[in-house]
Image: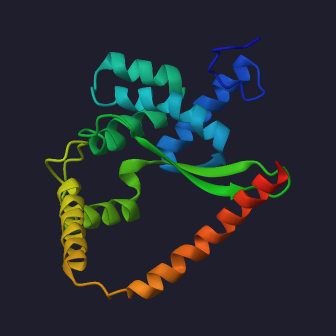
């Protein structure tokens, strides 16, 4: 049984898998976005993010460690020159997976995996959303943010209900009320009388 073994073997032996992940990480750094299957993208994210994190500190040791994973001089050069400047202020989460649907033929789930800081369209929409919508602190307590708005709505609805209750209701004639009550009681009394007769 393989309980708790989290690595996805991707139907490959270890040498093949490591070589494939090294090539994919190198392609991701050089091209900033690649199209692959979802399973490979998730495995690549675990492989590539620690390598990209090494680029924050430009030392000989970190370059050698990056080369150990990427196995390509051009990829290491690109990582430490261009990519490292863009990711300098980001505390992790350097890649994004965008699902594309299933591939014709084998129905495999396809996706793009890309470097977050190099997608100009997403960066523009993200900044416009941030500018348009001020950040609110999300708390489960009732003291701040959207909680106040919902409390105000509840208070308003309570006020309207109180006003409706204060309005005089239409008067019901006592004769009609008496007529309705026996109708409901008649079937019950008949059932009781039937039981008494049966005994």
Instruction: Please name the colour scheme applied to the rendered image.
Output: rainbow
Image position, residue 44 (x, y; %): 57, 34
The answer to which image quadrant residue 140 occupies is top left
Image position, residue 115 (x, y; %): 44, 47
Observer-nearest residue: 175 or 168? 175
Taking 179 as reference, is 77 left or right?
Answer: left
Taking 112 as reference, is 139 left or right?
Answer: left
**Total numbered circles:** 0
- Residue extending farthest top: 1
Q: Is residue 104 above or below residue 93?
A: below
Residue depicted at x 23% and y 40%: 89
Whether residue 125 can be seen here: yes
Residue depicted at x 24% and y 63%: 154
Taking 196 as reference, is 19 left or right?
Answer: left
Residue depicted at x 23% and y 43%: 139
Residue depicted at x 20% and y 58%: 151
Observer-nearest residue: 56 or 188? 188
Which quadrant is home to the N terminus? Answer: top right
Image position, residue 186 (x, y; %): 64, 71
Q: Is residue 160 above or below residue 139?
A: below
- Residue extending farthest left: 143
Taking 136 as reference, is 113 left or right?
Answer: right
Whether residue 72 can be seen here: no
Q: Is residue 80 above or below residue 32?
A: above
């Amino acid at each position: 049984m393989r309980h708790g073994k989290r690595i996805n073997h991707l139907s490959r032996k270890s040498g093949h898998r490591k070589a494939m992940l090294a090539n994919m990480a190198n392609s991701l750094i050089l091209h900033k976005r690649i199209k692959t299957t979802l399973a490979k993208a998730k495995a690549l994210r675990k492989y590539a993010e620690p390598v990209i994190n090494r680029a924050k500190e430009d030392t000989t040791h970190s370059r050698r460690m990056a080369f150990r994973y990427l196995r390509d001089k051009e990829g290491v050069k690109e990582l430490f020159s261009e990519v490292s400047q863009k990711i300098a202020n980001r505390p992790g989460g350097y890649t994004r997976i965008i699902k594309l649907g299933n591939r014709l033929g084998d129905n495999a789930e396809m996706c793009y995996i890309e470097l977050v800081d190099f997608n100009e369209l997403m960066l523009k929409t993200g900044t416009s959303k941030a500018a348009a919508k001020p950040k609110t602190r999300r708390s489960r307590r009732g003291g701040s943010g959207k909680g106040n708005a919902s409390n105000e709505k509840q208070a308003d609805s309570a006020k309207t209900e109180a006003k409706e209750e204060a309005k005089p209701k239409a008067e019901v004639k006592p004769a009609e009320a008496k007529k309705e009550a026996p109708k409901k009681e008649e079937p019950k009394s008949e059932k009781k009388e039937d039981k008494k007769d049966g005994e």
